[in-house]
């Protein structure tokens, strides 16, 4: 079913967007709750799903839809916060930030990319449990309810997935 939804969304099926909203809307709302005031969540969620629709051609159906959605949600939340907190500050007041040459930011982006590639190598059940825990910030009990599997299954998938992830990333760290 998930693979079908992913493919339908990437192909531009209007009904897939509605199904995506029904299936993953609460995950996006839960994630946005970390960034914005409660009265702003619904509006920002609509912005996220509008962006999902506009960006559907960039979505790879073989990848995790929840992780892609949360990436978009994160970007829109950051944009929202920037607009709200944007103020003009005289340049002479601002000190040079650490890593101003871009290395710090670039290194962080490279690490995130390595983790995303490593996650893609995991079996789907393990990847999904880890993504919901880390990107969706769901508890293991919430993940079990969302996936309709026993709590012990979620714990095992997460532990095995993290072990595999560690082994995949080990050569990179060495």
Image: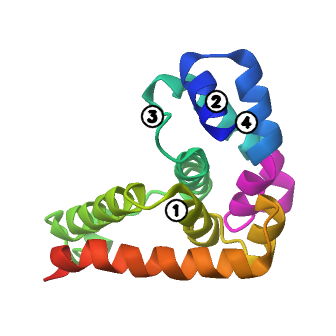
Q: Give the SS element for disc 2.
A: helix
* Predominant secondary structure, magenta span: helix
Residue at left offset 33%, top offset 56%: 117
Residue 69 visible to the viewer = yes
> Where in the figure is residue 130, as x and y percent of width and height?
56, 69
What residue did someone put label 3 on?
A: 60
Mark 1, Cα crowd under 10 Å, few <14 / some 14-19 / many 20+, is many
Q: Give the SS element for disc 1.
A: helix
Distance Cα–Cα, label 4 vs label 3:
15 Å
Disc ID at residue 20: 4
N-terminal of the two: label 4 or label 3?
Answer: 4
- Image position of 69 with respect to 78: above or below: above
Residue at left offset 31%, top offset 58%: 113
Left/right placement of residue 164 relative to residue 47 reads: left
> Could you tell me if the residues under marks 2 and 1 are in contact, i.e. CB atoms within 8 Å?
no
Magenta span = 25-42
Distance Cα–Cα, label 2 vs label 4:
11 Å
Distance Cα–Cα, label 1 vs label 4:
19 Å
What residue did someone put label 1 on?
A: 127
């Amino acid at each position: 079913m998930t693979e079908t939804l992913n493919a339908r969304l990437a192909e531009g099926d209007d009904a897939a967007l509605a199904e995506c909203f029904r299936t993953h809307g609460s995950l996006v709302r839960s994630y946005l709750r970390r960034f914005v005031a409660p009265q702003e969540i619904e509006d920002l969620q609509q912005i996220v799903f509008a962006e999902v629709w506009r960006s559907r051609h960039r979505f790879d159906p073989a990848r995790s839809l929840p992780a892609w959605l949360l990436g978009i949600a994160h970007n829109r939340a950051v944009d929202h916060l920037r607009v709200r907190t944007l103020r003009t500050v005289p340049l002479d007041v601002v000190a040079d930030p650490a890593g101003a040459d871009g290395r710090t930011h670039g290194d962080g982006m490279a690490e995130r990319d390595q983790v995303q590639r490593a996650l893609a190598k995991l079996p789907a059940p393990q990847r999904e449990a880890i993504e919901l825990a880390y990107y969706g910030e769901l508890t293991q009990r919430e993940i079990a309810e969302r996936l309709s599997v026993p709590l012990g299954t979620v714990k095992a998938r997460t532990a095995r997935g993290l072990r595999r992830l560690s082994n995949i990333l080990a050569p990179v760290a060495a």
